[in-house]
Image (tube, rainbow, N blue to C red):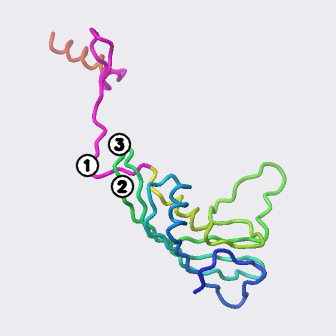
Amino acid sequence: MPNVTSFAVADLPQNRPTNFNLRPNENQLVEIASELGLSAVRKLSFVGQISAQGRHNWLLTSRLGATVVQPCVISLEPVTTRIDTDVSRVFLATLPDPGLGEVEMHEDENIELLGPTIDPFVVMVEALTLFLPQYPRKDGANLGVSVFTEPGHAPMTDQDARPFAGLAGLGKALKDDT
């Protein structure tokens, strides 16, 4: 399988799939990590094929495998995540006409407008971005409670901020009086 990043649509064969196997080198992994705000991308592979769908449309099917390192949202310690998922994109020569009036986005987020090339590298980085944990958290990391106030004042806690917390206490006091 060739390690090519972009295919000219005009050169793709209609009667058989075109295979690709992307495994970015160390410099590319550093660039991708920087672009996505990651601490590191340790491994990344994107293996699949592009095949014709009718006379003018194309289907990219692939498998994304990645090991990424992100800072924990609580402790900032490194969190390593393994991602293994199937990815597909349908490239249409023309997008469905929404008609006159309001323009709505197509329901299928895997559909893209076909251009002169199909670049699996771009799809790989986009898919990696979509499958990254949004809030990576190290096992055992807890936020804890911090309470701040001016000197000489009682600190206000989350419990105190609840609007009906005082009513519950008042109701209990009234029951105790009867």
Which mark is drawn over residue 125? none
Residue 143, given in percent of the width and then of the height, sits at 31, 38
Callout 1 touching callout 3 (CB < 8 Å):
no
In the image, farthest residue toward the front = 27
Is 155 drawn above or below residue 25 in the view shown?
Answer: above
Amino acid of disc 2:
Val
> With 131 as the anchor, is 7 left or right in this view?
right
**Disc 2 from disc 1: Cα separation:** 12 Å
> With 5 as the anchor, is 150 left or right in this view?
left
**Disc 3 from disc 2: Cα separation:** 11 Å
> With 10 as the anchor, is 163 left or right in this view?
left
Residue depicted at 36% across the width and 53% down the height: 78
Is 166 drawn above or below residue 93 in the view shown?
Answer: above
Span colored in magenta: 135-164
Q: Which residue is mark 1?
A: 140
Residue depicted at 63% across the width and 79% down the height: 4
Q: Which residue is mark 2?
A: 79
For label 3, count other residues whose C-alpha is less than 10 Å away and answer few (under 14), some (14-19) or many (20+). some
**Disc 1 from disc 3: Cα separation:** 10 Å
Residue depicted at 32% across the width and 21% down the height: 148
The quarter in which the C terminus is drawn is top left
Amino acid of disc 3:
Ile
Is 124 drawn above or below residue 1 in the view shown?
Answer: above
> With 5 as the anchor, is 71 left or right in this view?
left
Amino acid of disc 1:
Gly
Task: First in sequence, mark 1 or 3: give its number.
Answer: 3
Nearer the viewer's eye, disc 2 or disc 1? 2
Is 4 drawn above or below residue 15 in the view shown?
Answer: above
Q: Which residue is mark 3?
A: 74
Label 2 SS: strand
